[in-house]
Image (cartoon, grey):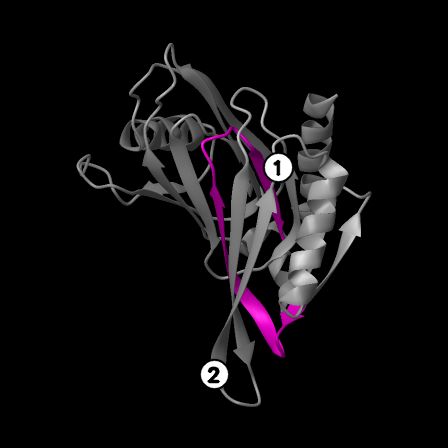
Amino acid sequence: MLHRRVVAFFVLASSALAGNAAAQGPVQLALSGEIDRTGGARAEVEVTFASSSGSAATARFSMFLAERTSAADLGVLLERRLGAAGVRVLNASSGQSARPITSLFFEDVLAIGMRLGNGLRSTVTLGEDRPDSVRILPPEDAKQDAELRVTASAWMAHERRRQRVELEARLEAAAPVVRIADLLVGASTRGGWASDMRNHEAWLPGPAAAGGVVDAVNFDLQTSGDWRLEIALVPRTQAR
């Protein structure tokens, strides 16, 4: 059932955004850590992007990785696999395996989703865009609680300055998807960021927060559990 819902999320993101695909992105994926689960664990990353023809396409990476596979190793794999599938990706940490963080930059992104955990961590940064919808699915293999931290940059036009908006939500591994969405909406409301929900599963952050226009957002899901994070971006033609 969850697999069908995941596919539905990316189909919805693709169909909703495909007509405005030309000027999306960039999205930064910062990876850290290594697989610490005895016997290894699976890593999944999916990117829906604007293809060279202007239509939406989705590239998927899903691989069971050996114990001690590092973030740098995963970064190389993602660059090659997703790049071969048509994603415009830059591994800014290529050749620097000693760095604690491996940064990948994806261009023309419509939606991105991932399930890591088991020692591998990531943050997702929309460097020049805001999210249209966010959905978080509970862990499957490593059932650990999580702390979600969301940091948004909002442009205050009248004051000609930027404002940081920070949200936090504690997510329990046993919580149903509808409970997770409720927590995200509640945290958003307390932080002064108007939002809504879709089907009691997806958080829909609004365009304004703390009196400013949101133009960049960072998502940091702190956990050793293999939670799934899904983010669809607002089309550039709608965001401005």
Q: How far, Cα to Cα, is label 2 from label 1?
A: 36 Å
- Left/right placement of residue 14 relative to residue 90 reads right
Q: Is residue 47 visible?
A: no
In the picture as drawn, the residue positioned furthest to the bottom comes out as 158
**Amino acid marked by disc 1:** Glu
Most common secondary structure along the magenta stretch = strand
Where residue 133 sits in the image (x, y, percent)?
A: 67, 50
Q: Which mark is residue 172?
A: 1
Residue nearer the viewer, 13 or 207: 207
Could you tell me which quadrant the N terminus lies in?
top right
Identify the disc placed on residue 161: 2
Q: Regarding mark 1 in the picture, which secondary structure is present there?
A: loop
Q: Amino acid at mark 2?
A: Arg
Q: Residue at x 53, y 39 (%)?
A: 146
Tell me which corner region of the image, top left, top right, bottom left or bottom right, holds residue 30. Answer: top left
Q: Circle 2: is it few (<14), some (14-19), or many (20+) Cα within 10 Å? A: few
Drawn side of residue 236 relative to residue 179, left or right: left
Q: Is residue 229 magenta?
A: yes
Q: Specify the segment rendered in magenta.
A: 207-233
199 vs 10, left or right, is right
Tell me, for residue 188, which label it has, or none: none
Q: Secondary structure at mark 2?
A: strand
Report the residue at 57% width, 39% height from top. 229
Relative image position of residue 213 (x, y in whole percent): 60, 73
Classed neighbour count for the residue bearing mark 1: other residues with Cα under 10 Å, few (<14), some (14–19), many (≥20): some
Q: Hey, which quadrant is residue 71 in on the image? A: top left
